[in-house]
Amino acid sequence: GVCSQNKMVASYGSTTDDGAAKPSQLTDLYEEASVLAPLTNKPNQHAPQKGVHLYQFPASFYSCEARLILEEKGVDYKEHNICIIAGVFDQYEPEYVRLNPRCVVPTLCVDGKVTTDAHNIVLHADEFFPQSVKLFPNDDTTDDVKKHFDLACSVFVEALTYGEVSGGPKLPWQMRGMMKSNHGNKYNMLKEKLNEHRDDPYLKACYKGKLAILTKQIEILDSEKQLNDIVDATKVIMKQLNKQLIEGPAKDGGWLCGDSYTIADMQWGLTLVRLHIRGYSDLLWSEYPAIEAFCQKLMARPTIQKAVIQYQTTTKIGGLVLRRKIAKNSRKLMLVVAAAALIGIGLKLNRNVSKYIQ
């Protein structure tokens, strides 16, 4: 029920600007800043008061998670793009922070009530939209669904997406350069925002807490040892997933935990598709044919095609970023450099993604 789901949500700890689950050393920082705790169905005067609204960024893994749960539930919703790329950083603007004190995407607003944190949105989707298909079963598969949803959530996808590890796929050179400057730009903007809004207790608390998280995040993503530890931990997780696939219902044509598709399958779909597109399949599951077959089955699912794969293209990402950069910054040189970088990244990304679009 909801009570047990809340316990699960509490265990995930903090998130990055992309709403990503964090290692335990970051969780403590969020606990020190209660204003940054996830919100669940909380009334907010700054939110749209009617309808379902999703604040998201197309390429964000955790925005994909929120989009996918809404697609799986068959919910009509309006998208609001929040550009989390350097030179824009919409997630730090006061208007958005008053919706989401964590300064991350996604944020779900339902009739004026706000829910933050991607995993939190997924876990409460059946409660928010009870009229549609139930993805969190209340039967003899419930414990298995919780276990394998939790297992998928424990993969540190952001580190694997933006970090470079020994023996792993390399980032495009354009993205590598952007990532190196991205965290420094975030740090500087947060310092500016903290100073600019020092007389606003709410915004001050949000920016101060986010700055502490970002400082620790930089340490993790810049550490080769920690990134290699994350890969090793992910390999252990993949071994557990493989065991379930070859011994559980999937071996007879079912899904991960039973005959029905659940949030456990959905979460693994998101995780495997992102890692597959990023080029990690050889490193993480080449010895497990059952995982590759499961990944291909999930990638063919229409909802994953619509909410995840088709969003990972230049059309969805580059156009939004350039429009927002133009709106916020008229310096021509920055725009030219940004455009060139995005075109280069987009060409490589499109080559990787286009073969999976059906």
Image (tube, rainbow, N blue to C red):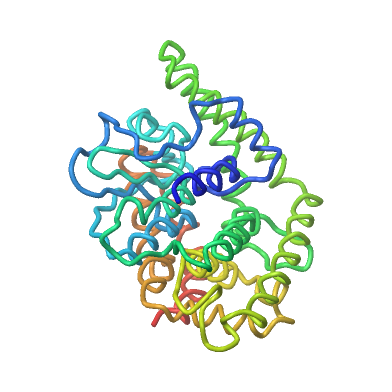
Residue 92 appears in view? yes
Q: Position of residue 25 (x, y in %)?
A: 71, 38
Q: Nearer the viewer, residue 77 or 258?
A: 258
At 60% across and 44% down in the image, what residue appears? Answer: 11
Report which quarter residue 149 is drawn in.
bottom right
Q: Is residue 207 left or right of residue 50?
A: right
At 47% across and 79% down in the image, what residue appears? Answer: 259
Report which quarter residue 291 is drawn in.
bottom right
Q: How many marks?
A: 0
Report which quarter residue 201 is drawn in.
top left
At 24% across and 53% down in the image, what residue appears? Answer: 78
Q: Is residue 234 left or right of residue 333?
A: right
Q: Position of residue 343 (x, y in %)?
A: 45, 63
Q: Position of residue 38 (x, y in %)?
A: 47, 37
Q: Nearer the viewer, residue 341 or 236?
A: 236
- Residue farthest toward the front in the current orientation of the protein: 140
Q: Position of residue 337 (x, y in %)?
A: 48, 51
- Residue farthest toward the top in the current orientation of the protein: 199
Residue 344 appears in view? no
Q: Quadrant of the C terminus?
A: bottom left
